[in-house]
Image (cartoon, rainbow, N blue to C red):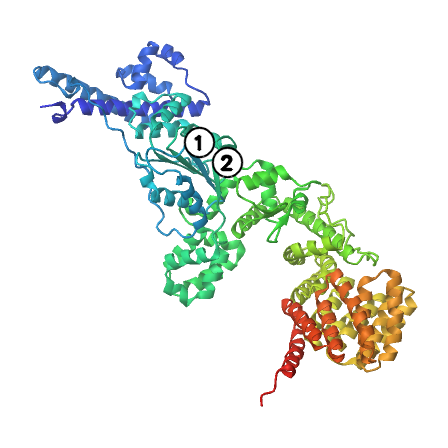
Amino acid sequence: MGDRAVPGGADEARALRERLAAELTAAVVRAEKRLGRAVDRTEMARRLNVSPSSLYAYLNGTTLAGTVIFGELLDALGVTGREAGRLGTLRDAAETARRLRAAHGRGRPSEPSATDAAPGPRPPVVPRQLPASYPQFVGREAEMRRLDALLADAADDLAPPPAVVTTIEGTAGVGKTTLALQWAHRVGEHFPDGQLHVDLRGFGSAAPVEAAEALHGFLLALGVAPGAVPAREPVASALLRTLLTGRRLLLVLDNARSADQVRPLLPSGPGCLAIVTSRNRLDGLVVREGALRVTLDVLPRYAARTLLERLIGTDRLAREPRAADELVELCARLPLALSVAAARAAAAPTGSVNLLVTELRQAQARLDVLGQPDADVDLRTVFQGSYALLPPPAGRLFRLLGCHPGPEIDESACAALAGTADPPRPLLDALTGAHLLRQRAPGRYALHDLLRVYAGELAGSGPPAERLAGTERLLRHTLAAARLADRHLEPWRPPAPDPGPGGDAGTAATAGRAPEAKLPRIDGHAAAVAWFETELATLQAVIAQAAATEGLESYAWRLARACALHLRRSGRRFQRGLVHGLAREAAERAGDRAAWCTATRQLGDAVSRLDRPAEARELLYSALRACHDLGDSEGVREVRLSLVRAYASAGDHRRALAQARLALAMGGRSGDPCALADGLTAVAQQQERLGRPAEALENARGALELYERLGHLEGEAGILLGIGRCEHALGRYSEAVGTYERSLALDRALGDRYREAHALDHLADTHAAAGRHDESRALRTRALDVLDGLYHPDARPVRAKLETAQAADAPTLP
């Protein structure tokens, strides 16, 4: 009977000795991590009063140390308490097994033991270490195709693919590990020699796995005896590469912090593939190892909705479709957040999706609602794992990004937050490298909603002065950029004075101490329009932020003034009303009566364009009374011009003309040629509407002369439209067409889409009157396209005229 048949046989003795050697090797690794250097084994042998060769034999499991020496060895390695007792018991068990084996061998001398036989070739160990894949995997089709392409050259075993490294990178909770494991299980047959897996714990509260520790585990999995695992990392790494040579294995190195952490674990020969997942951008692997980079963004909407359906149930979501769609957005389409939310909803009664959405709408509580006891799925803890590793300056910028309310931020605004003149590109690189910030376009960045909430929490829990100063620097910078762009929209108009509370000096104690951030490059009309179009959502959010922040309300109405012209020209009626409404509320809360008058007048203008004439007149008359009380004659004149527009939009041209004449008289007294031209324009427009084109034409030509002298392009475009209508009414169609075309060219140059549509419509009227119906229909169709694109109610009468013309052209049936 062989040794396997008796307790304490050769196999048991060998196994205990190898286990003890593995434990001692792990203790050495821990000691080296604690000391920050390699253990000097020669010095340790001297302290134990044994030879270096004996010490190596003890550590490798070749020889069992005596009880006293073993205790001293544990002391030298810093192993104490229960751990020392456990290892002592293991040593005693190995010693007992050795003695039993020796006794058994003496009692049965004629029967050879298993160890006496000549060892045959051992079959290679095939490790299968992959954890289970996530069963609710959705989306990621493009990323899976990129990974599949790695195997395109693996036609057969005679032509194995070269060793490849792939990095899967992305923000916390975006599904990197899920993708890696899903693909690894899917292609397992391409790697017949097995799969190795290690969680490197690069982020979180636990200490990261050192390369030496991971190497130890891989070598054991590949059949290396514990005592034969090299203690030095470079030697162990070389042994791993040797064992992988000629084999086809897949290595999944999950949750890596850096390229240096994984580099010793990478294969070098053909046939093996290493997939590395990380929240950090592993540029070193891309540059040195030629790694393929796969970067994960949040899920597409369809995939996020599909994930919810799988987790909660299609029928249940069908009963709450709007809540389901909103839940997708409130979770920022982040797979981890969606899974946590789905778990809460699935465990609750029917209707819980609506209730959950209601909770999540409270942005500051969103991470609490999505919190979990388990740290690896608690969003705040997961985000903290990435944030904690940032250098302090990058961490400060990330906190300050929580002060920015818009969907995107450009690099100059980042400089304002950071308090630097130039864009803080190294800090931005650190944040994008950690996937806490995403570069959407050159110089433009974005946080997904849940990261923005987290950054806001950090800013709110940090020093109040830091948040207040950062917010005001952002507001000052945004206001300066908006004013710069606005001046390029109306270069002929001198900049209006803007004292505000305390002037532009700001209110925060730290304002002005940091250098002013350089403004974005806005060097002309086209650049100004492009800037406003790009920043419009951010501007609206920043105005709302300023209006709600005590001490910073003045930025709300000053920003609203800077945006007013672009909002009007681009036909954004609803945003225009919202912005001026916020400005009015902020001025009222701050007690600034002059700012309230201006904001109320601008809100009245906006409301009149929303087909609410009674409300518009009420606002404008309240502004008129306030301007009289303040003795603001210029404010009175501007309100009267707004009343002209309000009455005219309601079709009351007689009252509009009365207000226009009052405005003209005030403009004449002011000595301001622009004010005089505006008054002449208002009078001419109402005279023309009242059917007095000859009188209107005289005033209109006077206004045009003044506008041309001032270089006031917008004024020219507007009065040319009126002159064209007068010429049309007088039957001078050719002159009217030429005048409209001049106005149309100016409207397009100014980017005034609303007036462009009206110029096209008037041109169509004149061509129709002249009998040119094909040209008229084409022009009218273009006008309708513009108004439909603006979602403007003026599209209705234009569409009606087009349908009437088409009906008139239709053949009559016999």
Give whichever of discs 2 and 1 has the lower sequence position: 1
Q: Is residue 385 left or right of residue 244?
A: right
Q: Position of residue 89 (x, y in %)?
A: 25, 24
Which quadrant does the C terminus fall into? bottom right
Which quadrant does the N terminus fall into? top left
Q: Position of residue 384 (x, y in %)?
A: 50, 42
Label 1 SS: helix
Q: Is residue 672 left or right of residue 606?
A: right
Q: Is residue 723 left or right of residue 367?
A: right
> In the rendered image, which residue does mark 1 sit on?
262
Q: Position of residue 621 (x, y in %)?
A: 77, 74
Can residue 140 be seen in this snapshot? no
Label 2 SS: loop
Q: Position of residue 68 (x, y in %)?
A: 28, 15
The image quadrant that residue 348 belongs to is bottom left
Asked whether the residues under the numbered discs 2 and 1 touch, taking CB atoms below 8 Å apart as contact, a structural biologist would say yes
